[in-house]
Image (cartoon, rainbow, N blue to C red):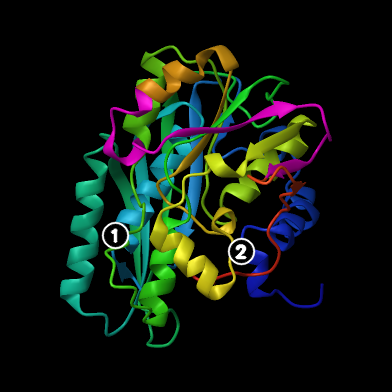
Amino acid sequence: MKQVQLSHGGGGEEMNRLIHDLFYKSFDNDILSSAEDAAVLKPEGNVAFTTDSFTVSPIFFNGGDIGKLAVAGTVNDLAMMGAKPLWLSSAFMIEEGLPFEELEQIVQSMAKELQKSGAKVVCGDTKVVPKGSVDKIFINTSGIGEVLVNGISAHNLEVGDAIIVSRDIGRHGAAIMMAREGIDLESDLKSDCETLWPAVEALIDAKVKIKAMRDATRGGLAAVLNEWAEASNICIEVEEEQLPVCDEVRGICEMLGFEPYDLANEGTFILAVDSADKEVALEALSKYSFCTDASVIGSVTDKKQGKVILQSSWGSNRFLELPKGELLPRIC
């Protein structure tokens, strides 16, 4: 590796190698190396902490904007660890010349999204840089939450567990692609960008035995399942027919040669639960409009440890690999 490439931020194999070979190696500690969506701080164990930066292009897209994305993204990382979002920081890097009305719209969007979880922005920072130093606006948000359910981890999966996806996949990546490339399919395809805490809270209230949760952002469904298979040293078998994909996303994938399970999502999460709880989990999720397509897509087996197997409707199967390269840069 002589230079950093866009693929090193794409959520796939190259990014995984960069994180493990450089950052984990240099900052090695047991909290960081657990590789979860949010760090559960010790010794107390009831505080979750996470951070993320957002550089989406375009900054306004169908279904959201960079402000909504920044709040939902950080709140969701806390939620995936069973933590109720409480406090956020927000740092803005703004290019000179950005229309003030656009900045105002972004901030108002953030305030509206915060109401869905009850979290509050309690500190922040603003930097305005010369034109050309950033592309319009970058936002960093960090979040702190109270862990309500301990032990949720990518290392917890066991043979027999059910794998659930909360809704149809690939919407965010497809919506950004359409906006950026001017693709017109005569449809109203919207990003799935959404705060997931209400749905997670419903799962907790229903006493679902949650093994692992992860929002399928960069690298999509494929990245999450491969990370889980490796972390728990198990096999995940997925039924392709059970994967919910809307017609617009399927059409874009066929047109451009992508796979929907590689595309980024911003309001879709993957859930591993005890098999006995899968129906309870689906019932809890069905109460939310952004989870109406929730489906059991597969299960944990011991067929091929560390691998994800995709079963086709024709009876054939293949490995669902970790995405390689950069499908679409500057997406979140």
Q: What residue would you read off at disc 2?
A: 10
**Extreme front residue here?**
314
- Residue type for callout 1: Gly
Q: Determine the residue positioned at 35% across, 58% down.
A: 191
Question: Circle 2 sits in a helix, a strand or a loop, which is it?
Answer: loop
Q: What residue would you read off at disc 1?
A: 64
* Residue 85 drawn at (x, y percent): 37, 33
Is residue 148 visible in the rendered structure shown here? no
Q: Determine the residue positioned at 70% across, 74% down.
A: 4
What is the spatial separation of the Cα atoms under label 1 and label 2, in whole angstroms? 21 Å
- Residue type for callout 2: Gly
Q: Determine the residue positioned at 25% across, 53% down.
A: 110
Left or right: where 310 falls relative to 248: right
Left or right: where 60 falls relative to 227: left
Question: Circle 1 sits in a helix, a strand or a loop, which is it?
Answer: strand
Give whichever of discs 1 and 2 has the lower sequence position. Answer: 2
**Extreme bottom residue here?**
131
Query: Where 136 falls versus 243 (above or below)?
Result: below
